Image (cartoon, rainbow, N blue to C red):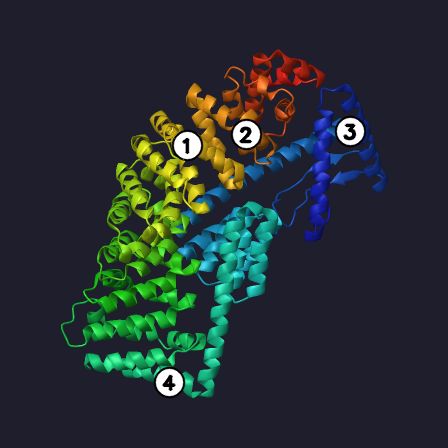
Amino acid sequence: MELYANEKLETFLRNVDHTSELVMELNSTDTATHEKAVERADRLVASMQEEKSCKSVINRTVINNSHSSVSGTVTATCEPGENPEIFMKALEHDAEERKQRRQIKEKKASALKDKGNKAFAVGDFESAVRAYTEGLEQLRDMQVLYTNRAQAFIRLNKFKEAISDCEWALKCNDKCIKAYVLMGKAHLALRNFTESRQCYEKIMNIAPEREGMVKDYLTRVELEQRKTLQEEIAQQELKEGKEEATRVPDLLRNLAKSNELNLYYCGGVELLTQAIRDSTGQAIFRLNNGFSIITGNDSIRRCLAQTSKEASSDELCVSVLRLWRTICNGNEENQQLLLDCLSTREQIVQLLTSRSSAVQQECLALLCVYSHTQHGRRVVMEKLNLYRMVENLMECIHNEDAPGIPALAVLENLAGEKKFRTQFRETFTEVFAPPFEHLLEHFSVSSQDLLLDFISVVGAMSLDEVISKNMASRKEFWRSSSAAMVRCASCEYRSILYPLLGLMINTASNPAPAIQEYAVESCSRCVVLLSDPDGGIITRAVGLLSVMLLKSSAATHEVVQQGVVKKLLKILKGAGPTSSRYSIKALAVCTASSKQVREELLKLDKKLMTVRKLLASTDELVVGNAALCLGHCLEVQGAAAGLLGTDCLPNLLRHAADGSARTDVQKNAAIALGKLCKADPRHMEKLRELHGLKILHSCMKLI
């Protein structure tokens, strides 16, 4: 047979697959399948006989294995009139040989892949490429060899070769995410921004769950394109010799001089800062080796390290920090380059504790520039010593003369990042909690803004479940926050009360013995706040009650004695959705505590009208707790009789029958319905009229 061309290879392989299927059917134990296979074999032999008049022969065939997985020989002959089973056995034997050869090649290719991976791991990318190439000579359709080699090519700055390998990997597997990632990186390196974006966007079609990763890659493309555009404009302005553009390189040359006085450098840095007015100036600074010139100056380095004893050292330090802020503001590339320098990032962290308030303020202003953007926060988390930085920021808060509010602004921005919160899980109660609790106990008129910002920081950090649980277990937090509630009730500190109550609600949602210890004190103060003129304060006070009463029977008893039932009922009569949710939950806890509370509610709320209205709410938490509260009150003698002729039974039946409702809602409604019918048989008659017995029985499995 003549040599097959590459374009005919796929057709040949399909025929081999069909033949393999036929062999399997011939070997089948199923009689019908076997007979059909024999007929197909006869037809196949007949067609072969028609193609060749005297003799049909499949000669030894050499297949071009370029970029394919098949190599070797195929030998099978069949004389006219020969039994087709013999022919099929020959093909089966040939297929087995091909399978064995494939397994041998796979083993060799895998060994070469491992060899390449080891070379890659130690940074020997040339050897890695050779190993992967040898592996591909064994097996042309091994996808991982193409992507691994592409990765090595990228490390060798051979981006076109990497793109080619990724294309071959996608021919092996058109859903290979790694191939698209590497191709996107290679295109980005070649500044093919559109092609790079397309690679990453295709990942979203294949794996929508990788959206976060894709967004990160697309952000990198955006940043690189912006950087490229800025540098092209900068190069053009330098080429044209524009005065504003050439001024920056001139000033940098002057600052490169050594052994000048601090005042000389201070003036030069100030002039340089004034000369950089936009992103073009920032790019010119970067392109003219500005970072190395500034950080390489011995006088500047000594000032930043706070080891200089020369005059004007603090002024020079402030000037340099102001320059950093100017060149980094809104410029991601410069932010990255500045913190790539080890000495610079160490100096920035250390300068937070400078003896000079001006240096501290300028250092914080620089960190604020970073913390305002996600990219900047990421650079800070990757490059700076976070634990040391946070410790130094806390010192700024402790020191009355230090700029505490900017320090907390930096921390609040960083606390919005999950990675930052995760890193401080183990040390939160050591680094954040003590200064916060100290400020809660000792705030004044001058420091209340500082406390407000600190509450925001702790609240953001508490979004992490581990940190929130650790905070809930601190007796110091509950003691200081409970004491702060009393002080904040006065007019001058009322701005603190609302966010403080919010933090306490979220923290109290965790199980912790410390909450029980301070529940009576905190809940008693919440009852007082239920009469506050501010609706927002009332809502959060009842919210804290609804959480803490569940954890302490002693606190429930105390607030009942303070008349909380009457106050909760008053709130429910005119409350908004959030207040209703909190109030009915707290009321349900109270009615569960004693018969006295249930009797009091029945006296205050005739026929439980206020509670029954809540059964019509669209909020399932409100409905569930209203049904629970009703169920408690129905244990009082005569309560069920008072509900005859009301909408209580139909509403409870509707919620018990609602299969789409939360299980707790159905359960509480069914329990209340059962208590209603048991307490007064006349409700049972009404239930029969509404064909509700079956519904009630079906709900018993929930109870």
Foreground disc of the pair 3, 2: 2
Q: Mark 1: which secondary structure?
A: helix
Which amino acid lies under the numbered mark 2 shown in the image of this protein?
Val
Which amino acid lies under the numbered mark 1 shown in the image of this protein?
Val
The answer to whether mark 1 and mark 2 are in CB contact below 8 A is no
Which amino acid lies under the numbered mark 4 shown in the image of this protein?
Arg
The residue wearing badge 1 is 564
The residue wearing badge 2 is 611
Q: Residue at x 76, y 39 (%)?
A: 57
Residue 201 visible in image = yes
Which amino acid lies under the numbered mark 3 shown in the image of this protein?
Pro
The answer to whether mark 3 and mark 4 are in CB contact below 8 A is no
* Crowding at mark 3 (Cα within 10 Å: few <14, some 14-19, many 20+): many
Q: Nearer the N terminus, badge 3 or badge 4?
A: 3
The residue wearing badge 4 is 247
**Residue 138 point in image, percent of width and height:** 54, 46
The span from disc 2 to disc 4 (Cα, nearest Å) is 76 Å
The span from disc 3 to disc 1 (Cα, nearest Å) is 95 Å
The span from disc 3 to disc 2 (Cα, nearest Å) is 86 Å
**Residue 482 point in image, percent of width and height:** 30, 40
For the residue pair 248 and 109, the one nearer the viewer reads as 248
For the residue pair 35 and 225, the one nearer the viewer reads as 225
User: Relative to 578, is 187 above or below?
Assistant: below
Q: Nearer the N terminus, badge 3 or badge 1?
A: 3
The span from disc 1 to disc 4 (Cα, nearest Å) is 73 Å
